[in-house]
Amino acid sequence: MSAVTSGRERAASQPPGGAGGTGDNEPSDARGPLGARFAGRGRRAGLVAAGAAVAVTLALPPMLTASQLSVYILLALSAMVTVGLSLLMGYAGQVSIGQASFYAIGAYAAGLLSVHGTPPLLALAAAPLIAALFAAAIGGPLLRLRGHHLAFATIALQLILISLLGEADWAGGSVGLQGIPRLSAGGTELGEDIHYAYLAWAAVAVTVLVARNVVTSRAGRGLRALATSETAASASGVPVARYKLAVFTLAAAFAGLAGGIYAFFIGYINPGSFPVLLSIQFLVMAVVGGLGTIWGALLGATAITLIVQFLNDLGSRPGMPASAPSILNYAVYAALLILVVLFLPRGIVPALRDAWQQRRIAGHAGAGTGTAERAEP
Amino acid sequence: MRPRTPLAALTIGLALTVTACGGGSSASSSADDGPIDIGMITSLTGQLQTLGTEGRKAAELAVKQINKDGGVLGRKLELTVKDDKSLPDQSVLAFNAFKDQGVTAVLGSPSAGSALATLPAVDRAEIPYISLSPADEQVAPVHPYVFVVPALASDYAERLLQYYKSEGVSKLAVAYDTKTAYPTAGYKAMKAKAGEYGIKVVATEEIQSTASDFSAVFTHVKGTDAQALAVWVTGPASVVLTKQYAASGLDIPISFTGSQASKLWLDPAGKAAEGAIVASSIGLVGDMLPDGAQKKAIEAVNKPFTQKYNYPPPQFAQDGYTGVQLLAAAIEKAKSTDHEKIRQAMEGLTLATPNGTYRYSEKDHSGLSPDYISVNAVTDGRFVPTVWSKSELEKVAK
C-alpha cells in the first residue's frame, strides 16, 4: 500500500501550486517573481508540447500495422482508466484495486444494450453513465472505509462482480457475451480498427480535459486538501464525503467509457476478460507514471503497455526455452516494477519534473532564489 | 513550467510504439518457394499455461517431422508462437500480428475465451483458424474459416451417455462447475441428449471450481435414486472432489471428462481415483489399442515426444500435433497457400490423426465424432478402457 502513502505524502509535501500535473493557473506567491516567469514560459511550452503530443497521437494510426494498432487502442483504453485512477488516488487519496470492475460494467452495459437492439452509439454513451451510477450507489458505504480497508473492499467488489457475471445467464454467463455488433452511427459502420483508434484517443482527450478541469477548479483544491488531511479539509469547509464520492464516480465513468469501447472493439466479452490482475495493472500504471498527475497516468499506461508487450513478444520468440514466457512475464516484469518503486518512488513524471527543475535552477543560480524551496526533494 | 518534460517524454513514448511493439510486416508467405508461415496463438502464461506449453511442444514436433519429410508442397513449414496469457484480448492482438505477418493459417488458443474473442477478427480477416479449444460455441453456428480440433464438450457428453446406457444406467446425477464454460456446455449437452439414451437426470448439483468442500454434493446425491454421478469440472478442484467422493461412502460410480484425463489429476488423486470412470481422447490409450492405422498415428507423436520430454504427451499436446497435421494436409490438398482454397480443402478433409479420423464438412467444422472418445476406468493408477469402450474403439481403430 505504499502507493497510498506516497500519494498522500506527495500531496502533503507539495505547496498548493505543485500538486497538479497540469493546470494551476494562479501562480503561487511561494514561487516569487522568477517562479512566475517560469510558469508563464512553462505554460507556453506546455501548450506547444501538448499540441505536438496531439499531432503525434493523430498521425500515428495510419502508420501502424494491424497488431500495433490494436496495442495502440488497448493502450488508449488503459490510459483512460488510469487517468481516473490517478485522480482518485493522487487527489482524493482513495485507493481502488478494483477499477477493472467499472471497466467491466461499462463493457457489459454497452455489450448487453447493443446485443438487445439499442443503437450502438447510445449503448456506448450509456456505458460511462451506468458505471458512474453503480459507483455512486456503492460509493456511499464503500468510501467510509480508508486505506487498506478500502483497497480490500474494492478487490472484493470486483470478485463479487466477476462471480455474478459468471452466473448470470442473461449476460452470457461463463461463456461470455457474443455477437456484439461493431459501432455504427447513422448507417456508417466503424468497421476498421483505425476508426477505433481515433475513437479511443478522442475519448482519452475527453477524459484528460475533464480531469484537468476538475483539478484546476475550486473543487480540485478542496480535493487536494482532503488528500492531505480529511479533518483539516472538513474543518475548512470542504464537503469531504461528497467530494470523495464525486471523484470515485468520475473515475468509474472514465473506466466505464473505456470498457464500452473495449466491448465494441473486441466484439466479445466474458468474465475472464476482467481479472483482478487487470485492476492491479491499472494501479501499477498510475503508480509508475506518478499519482496525481494526468501526464503521469498517460505515460504510465504507455510505459507498462509497451513493456508488457515487449516482454511477451520476447518470451515467445523461436529459440527461447519453454520457461521463458513465465520468467519474462512474471519475474522480469516484477523486477522492473521493484526497480521503479525503489528509484522513482513518486513515479516517472514527478521525477522527471524534479530533474527538469533542478536543471533550470542550476542555470539561473545567479539570477534568483525564489524557486529554491521547490527544488527540495 | 512543469508540463514540458513529461510531454516530450510522452511524445517519445508514443513514437516508441511504432518501433517497439510487434515485428512489423515481414516476409509474406505468398512467395512461392519460401517457407509457409503458420501462426500459433497459445497460452504460455496465465491460467491455461500448462495446456498451452504442452500444445506448443507437440506442434513444434509436428512441424519438425513434416519438414524432415520434405515439407508441404515442397516448402518448409515455419511456426511462429505468440502467448495470449490466457486473456481474450491478448489473443486478438496476437491474431492481428499474424495478419500483419501474412501467415497462411493460425492455430488458435486452448482458452475458450480467447477463441471466442478472436472469432470476429477471424471472420473479417478470412484466415483459416484451427482452434485448439473445445468450446461448442465456435462451430454452432459455423464460422467459415474456423475449424475445431479437440472433441467438443457435447461429444464427451454424448459418449458418456452411450456408456451409461450400455451399463444399464437410467437415472443419472450430474454435478457441474457453473462458472467455467466447458463444464457448463457439457452439462447442457448431457441434459439435452439424456432422453435419447433413455436416461433421466434426477439430480443437478451446481459446484464451483474455487470451492474446497464438496461433501454437500455427495449428501444430496445419496438422497436420490441416481445410479451414477457424472462430474463436469476443470482444474485442481477435481482432485479435492475425487478425494472427498472416496471418503463420502457414496456407493454409485463417478465419472469425469477429458479435463481429468491427465497425470495432473491422476497423480495427486492417487488411490481415491481407483475405479473412477474418465472419458478421454483415443490418443491417451494408444498402447492398449489393437495394431492398425489408429495405433500407428498415435505412436507417431507418442514415441518422439516421450523420447524428448520423458513423459507421454497429454491430451493438449496431441491436439497441437493434430492441428498442425490437419493444416498440412489441407494445404497439400489445396495445392496452394491461398486462404480460401485452404478453407475449401478443410471442408472436404478426411484425415487419420492421433485424435481419431477427422471428417470435416461444410456443415460440420468440428470433424471428430464421439466414436473416438475412450471411456476408461482408473485401474492401478492407469487409464484403462472399459470392456464396452474397448470393443467400441476396436471398431474405429482399424
Image (cartoon, coloured by chain):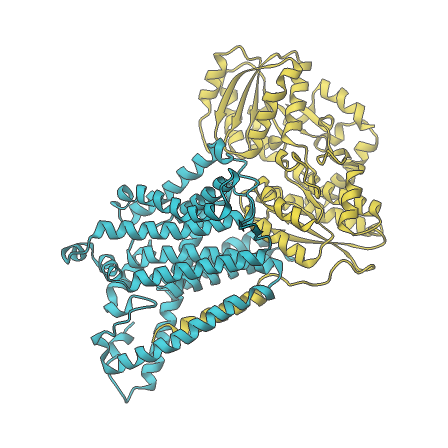
Q: Residue furthest front?
A: A186
Q: Nearer the viewer, residue B107 or B65?
A: B107
Quarter of the image with the N terminus of chain B is bottom left
Say if residue A321 shows up in the picture: no
**Chain B: drawing colour:** yellow
Q: Residue furthest bottom?
A: A366
* Residue A374, image x, y percentages: 27, 75
* Residue A258, image x, y percentages: 45, 52
Say if residue A259 shows up in the picture: yes
Residue B161 placement, left or right of A98: right
**Chain A: drawing colour:** cyan
* Residue B393, image x, y percentages: 76, 24
Q: How many numbered marks have been drawn onto this rendered protein structure?
A: 0
* Residue B107, image x, y percentages: 68, 46
Name the quadrant containing residue B326: top right
Q: Residue at x 25, y 53 (%)?
A: A243
Quarter of the image with the C terminus of chain B is top right
Q: Is residue A20 above or below residue B270?
A: below
